[in-house]
Structures are given as structure tokens and as C-alpha cells.
Amino acid sequence: MSTAAPDRPRAVLLGVQLPDVGDEEFASSLAELGRLAKTLGLEVVARVVQRRRELAAAAVVGAGKLAELARWTGGSGVVPLGPPQRRRADVEAEDEEPEEPSAGAAESAPPARATVVLIDHDVTPSQARNLERATGAEVLDRTAVILAIFQRHARSREARLQVEIARLSYLAPRLRESSGGKERQGGGIGGRGAGESQIELDRRKLRDRIAELRAELAAIERDAGTRRRRRSEHPTVALVGYTNAGKSSWMRALTGSGVRVEDKLFATLDTTVRALAPEGIPRILVSDTVGFIKKLPHDLVASFRSTLDEARGSDLLLQLADASDAAFPAQIEVTRAVLEEIGAGDAPRLLILNKVDRIDAAVRERLAAQWPEAVLVSVRDPADVDRVRERIRAHFERDMVEAELLVPYAKQRVVGEAHSACRVLAERHDAEGTHLLLRARPEVIARLRAGL
């Protein structure tokens, strides 16, 4: 006898539109938060939004919107006075707009309560705590949501370490004082130091744990750096772009590899390196990288710096964008900003507007005029895949030069290296050794000459 699948946890999205955010940008950001919620396995049942000059100091939104939010979660809608939050004169400050219910909000309590509130902002620990007390639901800001998704999708040891470092760095300032925590002070071997409270001890343990994880990650990064140096003799391409732009699908199409492909945000966290197929000489290596997103937490960027080094050290960046997403120009700008942050802003780049099979001919024509440097393609079209593959090969072909090498018979290993790293146009033998006419990148020619 089959049993029904359990309902997914329900969530309410909370957004505040500040004066410097336009309507389109605000709607796009809130829609993206909804996709993040879906990736996290949550069912979004409502959106509560408000225009304000700034986030309310106590609980992000004003009293009316807080009550509306509580109707979806079953909370009181009021931040209790007293510890742990001191009373403020403007705790329930007047709202920036009349308190009108959001679309879809019901005056009566909904039949199914939401147990999670997702905020499309980064909030302070006290704001999150006050929201939890007023709604009776778990509260996650945008950074917490992204961290939860990264933690769920991390598979390799390196990715798990990177995510754990970022998670603990986020958690450290959000540790809560236990009841009487400030008064529980003492010393003793293996215990707290003299005058050290419980929360101080917890924070010290977190700092020590982060230091341990960073040391372990550094060892893994050294090995990864060694592998990158070994690959440096080959031309390299890195797929970069906004999360869910289709990087993994293109990785599979270009290399014929079995890379995991999912229609989810941040489905790929681990770097995968494969050869462009069909293989040629020289062999071109393609790497898939973690996706970018608006407001990507700085701790995650720092933790994933080793992974993102694949982009910084590549000879060509294949920047993908989802042409069917109306917000893709802003996503291209986010990608550019992150590349600048990791030191890859000046790397050669080929812009790929992907998923054009989802838009009509008129939109395609308009995009082609607006983005003349871009290649409009669909990974589902084999002809488009061939076009991109040829653009990659042509990029490296133009940087190649021809050179002649005379390899003495005592150093015939250089001949083998030349065949694997260069295109050998001619080869002949005489009493002096092997004469090679090669076509390759200048740095490869220089390396071979240095080995003679």
C-alpha cells in the first residue's frame, strides 16, 4: 500500500523595497529568492512586501506588515518587550506606506501555516531574533538561504570544507546568550578562562574550529594548485556565469562527460576539468565552476577562492547567461563584478547567450542587435554546440605561432612532448637529430626550447 509523499515545508518571502531599488530589480530579486526556496525544498505560500526608506531597526518591517506576516505563520505579530530585546521608542515605527495587505494575504489565518520566513536581505542577529519571536517561525536571511543550499550540494571534501568555513563565519556573531550566560564565569583546566562567559567560550571554539578547517583546506588547495600547474601547458577554458545559466549542460555537450546536470540553483559546487571533445592537438581543457548570484556572501567568495582560481588561471572565459531570463543583463553584471573581485576581470571572454530555444525569433533578433559580441545559442542544438566549439578552437588558433626545433637524439623526450602539446606540421631526421616544424602557443614553444 503506497503512502502519500509528505508535504514540503512552507515558507513566506519577506521583501523590503528601498528607495535605491527599482520595481523591476526588486521583483527580480524576490523571484530569485523564490527559486532559492524551491532549491531548498520549500513551498512558497505567500509574499509580504513593503516600501521603506530603510529596514526597520527592530524587525525589518513595521507593525502592520509584521502582523500580516504573522497571519501566515501563526505568530503573535508583536515583538515581546523585555529581554533579550530592549524596548526602543520606535520599535513599532510608523511604516513608510499605508498598511495594506499584500496580494494573496488573507484576513483570516491560512489553512496551512508557514514554518519558515525567508528575507530578501541580510539582517542583523537581533532583527532575525525579533522576527522569530513575532512570527513563531524559523527566519533565514538571504545569506543563510544560500549557505544552506551550498551545504546541501557540497559533495567533495574541498567543497564541504569551504562551505563549513563560510557557515561558521556566518554563525559566530549570531551565537545567542544562554540564560544567565553573562554571569556564568569561571576557570579551571579545560574549562573557561578566568572571567570568560559561556558565549565567549563558544565563540572561541568556533574560531579554533575555523582555523582547523582552514589549515585542512590549505593542504587541499596546495594539491589543487599543483594539478593546475601541471595543466598549464594546455590551453584552458573556464565556464563561468550566473547560477543555473546552463554551465554544466555546456560542460557535458562540449566534453562528452557525464557531469551532473540539474535545473536547480547551485547544483554544481565542485570544479570539474575535462578535455574538449573531439580531442585535438593541442588538447584544450574545459573546467566547470561554481555559479554566481546577486549578493553572493563574501565569506563564500573567500572560501571558494581556490575553486574560482580555475577561472582566474584560464586562457579563455566562456561566460554564460540565460537569454530567456529577463534579468540576464543584471546577471551578466553580477558575474563581471565577481570576476573582478577574484582578479579575473581582464581575462579574455566569450559571451554566450544560452537557452535561445525558449525565446521567439523577434526577441532573438533584438538580442543579436543589442549584444553583437555575444553568441546566441541553445545547448539542445548540436549545430550550436559545434559553433561554440569552433569559436573556442579559433580563439587559441589565432594565438599560435610556427617554429622550427632541432632536437638532438639524446633528448628525444622533447619530441614526445612536442607531439602531445603542439601541432606537428613536419618532421624529418638527419645526422644532427630530429627537425620539427611546430605550431603552438609561444609559451609552449619556449618551454620546449628550454628543455633542449
Image (cartoon, rainbow, N blue to C red):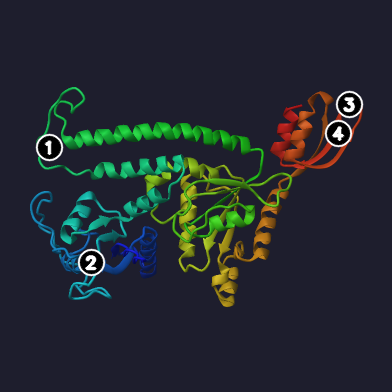
Q: Earlier in the sequence, mark 2 or mark 4?
A: 2
State how far apart marks 2 and 3 are (Cα).
85 Å
Identify the residue under disc 4.
435
Q: Quadrant of residue 412?
A: top right
Foreground mark, 1 or 2? 2
**Can you give x and y, in whole percent of width and height, for residue 62 in the image?**
18, 64
Identify the residue under disc 1.
182
State how far apart marks 3 and 1 are (Cα).
84 Å
In the picture, the quarter occupied by the C terminus is top right
Q: Amino acid at mark 3?
A: Glu
Whether tag 3 and tag 4 are in contact, CB under 8 A, the answer is yes
Q: Secondary structure at mark 1?
A: helix
Q: Which mark is residue 113?
A: 2
Q: Which mark is residue 432?
A: 3
State how far apart marks 3 and 4 are (Cα).
9 Å
Looking at this rendering, what residue extends furthest in the right direction?
431
Q: Amino acid at mark 1?
A: Lys
**Can you give x and y, in whole percent of width and height, for residue 287 in the image?**
57, 48
Whether tag 3 and tag 1 are in contact, CB under 8 A, the answer is no
Foreground mark, 2 or 4? 2
